């Protein structure tokens, strides 16, 4: 009853129409959808306007993009068409100074509205937010940016925002390539490096490159290899470069040598899949009966077929298994939560709280950990297995030698998770300069406490790049001393490196050892988001807003940023620009009539570890939401939507009343003639309203151009009421406060005395 009352007070008819439209599209079979609405060859302001509204077209595009997330590569063409349509729609629907930021928010709201299907209250709020944002009012757009934790980006779209290590659904991720690019654009990224473990499908590469071309994001694709190193595995990320076009790169994927390496990589993936299925079988046989005894409810088996359906077209891993088991156990946990809530004891409440906080990481640690269950294989450390595939048995020297023969312009990035400075130095020596970059910061590894030696690694990197021979020798000598007490074999190797330090830094004299920053984002249940940005390239308002957010981590990485201004001749100069161009011969006027572009530059070798960094994580830290068990057991009343969701008629009436009351008091207080005292407010509001209507119609050229749109459709009642509210308040401030109270009563100044 309360929800229905709130919906009548707080939401408009247009909000409910948007909700009904989106749900109707969601409930329509994909084969019955109107293909013309997602036709990218038609302009949004063309014939599409006669077929459907912009909201309908955006909803069709988002639904078509998200609906076939797991449909495989056969739906890649449909996803790309939907992304092109959605991108054009949001950019052309935004008519404000914050055009790109408005488009980002519109895309995020529509995506959340589609995902909230079935929750009518949440969808109504999102529909109301969508309708407020589509007007492009800067204040409303910035409110929505803050609500969805999206930093405001410069409208010049020149920010240095990037992520050098992410995954899509073809590997460890959850999102399709098109979906990943859409989310990257929403976050404001301009550069992305996508990792594929051992093998990349040409169809997946084609989809992600085409999606990046649509949104203007620079995308690199690389292969990630795992190499044994003293009883554990290290990550090497190989990124081929030097291609003139996307088609050139796609043709390179059919190189016979690369195809042969990727075939060996598929053997590694098949081996890992067998180990994961073995872990699942052991869980069903050993761990599941223990859980039944502990929880007191029947725990069904998770079949291998159901698990592989959950993985989809990705590559089965321990993370996939943990997520599948967590989702599989949620119904049983809800039954246990209901039983504990009925007991209502101190022990039951404590257990309920623990069950609600039980997440995917706990599944990995408690259910799949080889330390707790020795019978399960150690999936995180395949180097200890006896049946390692041939590709995983290659040393760093052997792997880099094979990769060097494939492409001369490659980048080879060494992951620094769980590595010390001496490990990095030894790997750089073994690779003989083939390692071109260090992943100096990895968000996932940092959050898990696996990057405790960043400062020492950065110090070694800076000494090598600067060519400081004595400093490099001092660092290597210190490492050799530590190895004397740990490993004699490694100590002898470091003494050999110490004798050949000039050979080590010679590899990086002309080609400095660069840096990469990645998040390892898989778009799954994690506590960190995708993307980084350099603070100097963002608006100051955005940096201050992010600093106030408690879940925004401080990243100890900084990089020098250089601003450069470029001038170029406009492609379609106006008459005024052409006239200015004739005066460029005058001193100091050589840039007249030219477009000014500001850009930022930074060098990858300039990144270093420091206490106060200038790198900002765009995704922030997601707050733990739990499993929702306590909310399910104790369902509270529906919360009030808030004043921002008031019905438009009610809010407009309140705005007019808020402006009318001070204006009416002002006329009564300052005017002696009874007509102006009692009727002046109505005259003032009438003149203001007519003036605003004329301005809106003339600004849209509704009085002169040949159009089918009625002039009333170009008048915004909400903005008219805003103007009436502010003009009423201004009357009180100018007439009563300034003229009467300040000038006449306090200072004794008036027009009669002047």
Image (cartoon, helix red, strand yellow):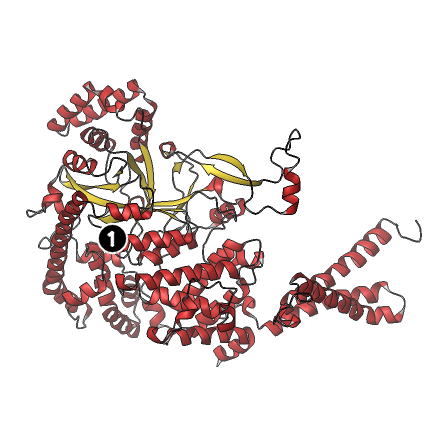
Q: Is residue 60 left or right of residue 480?
A: right
Vertical side of 152 occupied by 303: above or below? below
Tell me which corner region of the image, top left, top right, bottom left or bottom right, holds residue 687: bottom right
Vertical side of 146 occupied by 35: above or below? below
Which residue corresponds to the image point at 33% horizontal and 51% vertical from the top-left?
209
Vertical side of 470 occupied by 113: above or below? below
| Residue pointed to by mark 1 | 202
Q: Which of the pair 286/304 is nearer the observer?
A: 304
Tell me which corner region of the image, top left, top right, bottom left or bottom right, holds residue 352: bottom left
Helix, strand or loop at label 1? It is helix
Residue 686 location, x and y as percent?
Answer: 76, 69
Q: Which residue is outermost to the left?
A: 386
Residue 398 location, x and y as percent?
Answer: 14, 35
Please rate how many residues cluster around mark 1, counting C-alpha atoms within 10 Å: few if below 14, some from 14 to 19, many from 20. Answer: some
Residue 341 location, x and y as percent?
Answer: 30, 72
Vertical side of 302 occupied by 521: above or below? above
Q: Is residue 700 left or right of residue 8?
A: right
Q: Which of the pair 166/351 is nearer the observer?
A: 166
Tell me which corner region of the image, top left, top right, bottom left or bottom right, holds residue 709: bottom right
Residue 256 location, x and y as percent?
Answer: 17, 45
Q: Which of the pair 434/752 is nearer the observer?
A: 434
Which residue corresponds to the image point at 45% horizontal and 35% vertical from the top-left?
561
Q: Which of the pair 500/92 is nearer the observer?
A: 92
Q: Is residue 109 left or right of residue 527?
A: right
Q: Which residue is outermost to the bottom?
A: 1
């Amino acid at each position: 009853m309360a929800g229905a009352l709130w919906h009548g007070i707080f939401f408009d008819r247009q909000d409910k129409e948007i909700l009904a439209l989106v749900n109707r599209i969601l409930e329509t079979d994909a084969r019955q959808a109107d293909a013309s609405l997602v036709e990218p060859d038609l302009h949004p302001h063309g014939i599409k306007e006669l077929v459907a509204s912009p909201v309908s077209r955006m909803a069709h595009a988002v639904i078509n993009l998200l609906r076939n997330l797991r449909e495989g590569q056969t739906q890649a063409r449909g996803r790309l068409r939907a992304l092109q349509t959605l991108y054009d729609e949001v950019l052309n629907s935004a008519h404000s100074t914050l055009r790109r930021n408005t488009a980002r928010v519109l895309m995020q709201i529509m995506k959340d509205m589609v995902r909230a299907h079935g929750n009518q209250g949440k969808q109504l709020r999102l529909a109301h937010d969508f309708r407020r944002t589509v007007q492009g009012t800067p204040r409303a757009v910035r409110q929505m940016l803050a609500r969805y934790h999206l930093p405001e980006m410069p409208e010049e779209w020149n920010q240095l925002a990037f992520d050098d290590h992410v995954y899509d659904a073809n590997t460890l991720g959850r999102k399709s390539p098109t979906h990943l690019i859409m989310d990257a654009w929403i976050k404001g990224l301009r550069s992305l490096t996508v990792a594929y473990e051992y093998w990349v499908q040409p169809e997946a590469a084609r989809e992600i490159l085409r999606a990046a071309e649509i949104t203007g994001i620079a995308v690199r694709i690389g292969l990630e290899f795992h190499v044994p190193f003293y009883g554990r595995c290290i990550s090497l990320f190989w990124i081929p470069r030097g291609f003139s076009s996307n088609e050139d790169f796609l043709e390179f994927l059919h190189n016979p040598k690369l195809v042969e390496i990727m075939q060996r990589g598929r053997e590694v993936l098949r081996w890992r899949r067998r180990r994961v299925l073995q872990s699942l079988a052991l869980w069903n046989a050993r761990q599941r009966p223990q859980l039944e005894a502990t929880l007191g409810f029947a725990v069904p088996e998770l079949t291998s077929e159901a698990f592989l359906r959950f993985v989809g077209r990705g590559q089965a891993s321990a993370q996939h298994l943990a997520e599948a088991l967590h989702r599989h156990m949620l119904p049983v946990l809800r039954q246990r939560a209901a039983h504990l809530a009925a007991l209502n004891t101190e022990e039951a409440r404590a257990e309920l709280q623990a069950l609600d906080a039980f997440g995917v990481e706990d599944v990995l640690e408690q259910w799949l950990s080889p330390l707790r269950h020795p019978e399960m294989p150690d999936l995180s450390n395949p180097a200890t297995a006896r049946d390692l595939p041939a590709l995983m048995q290659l040393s760093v020297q052997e792997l880099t030698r094979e990769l060097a023969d494939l492409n001369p312009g490659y980048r080879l990035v060494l992951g620094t998770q769980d590595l010390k400075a001496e490990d990095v130095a030894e790997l750089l020596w073994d690779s003989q300069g083939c390692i071109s970059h260090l992943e100096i910061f990895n968000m996932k590894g940092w959050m898990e406490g696996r990057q405790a030696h960043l400062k020492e690694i950065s110090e070694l990197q800076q000494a090598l790049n600067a060519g400081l021979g004595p400093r490099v020798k001092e660092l290597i000598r210190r490492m050799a001393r530590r190895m004397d007490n740990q490993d004699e074999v490694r100590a002898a190797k470091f003494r050999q490196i110490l004798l050949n330090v000039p050979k080590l830094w010679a590899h990086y004299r002309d080609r400095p050892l660069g840096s990469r920053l990645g998040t390892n984002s898989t778009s799954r249940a994690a506590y960190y988001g995708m993307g980084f940005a350099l603070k100097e390239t963002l608006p100051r308002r955005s940096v201050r807003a992010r600093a106030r957010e408690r879940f925004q981590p401080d990243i100890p990485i900084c990089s020098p940023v250089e601003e450069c201004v470029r001038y170029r001749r406009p492609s379609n100069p106006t008459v005024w620009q052409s006239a200015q161009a004739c005066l460029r011969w005058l001193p100091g006027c050589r840039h007249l009539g030219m477009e000014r572009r500001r850009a930022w530059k930074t060098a990858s070798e300039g990144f270093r570890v420091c206490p106060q960094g200038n790198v900002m994580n765009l995704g922030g830290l997601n707050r733990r939401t739990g499993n929702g068990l306590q909310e399910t057991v104790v369902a509270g009343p529906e919360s009030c939507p808030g004043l921002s969701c008031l019905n438009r008629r009610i809010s407009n009436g309140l705005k007019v009343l808020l402006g009318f009351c001070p204006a009416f008091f002002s006329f009564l207080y300052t005017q002696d003639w009874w007509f102006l005292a009692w009727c002046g407010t109505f005259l003032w509001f009438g003149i203001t309203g007519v003036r605003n209507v004329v301005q809106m119609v003339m600004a849209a050229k509704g009085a002169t151009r040949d159009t089918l749109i009625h002039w009333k459709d170009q008048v915004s009642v909400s903005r008219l009421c805003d103007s009436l509210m502010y003009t009423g308040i201004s009357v009180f401030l100018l007439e009563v406060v300034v003229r009467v109270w300040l000038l006449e009563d306090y200072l004794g100044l008036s027009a009669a005395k002047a």
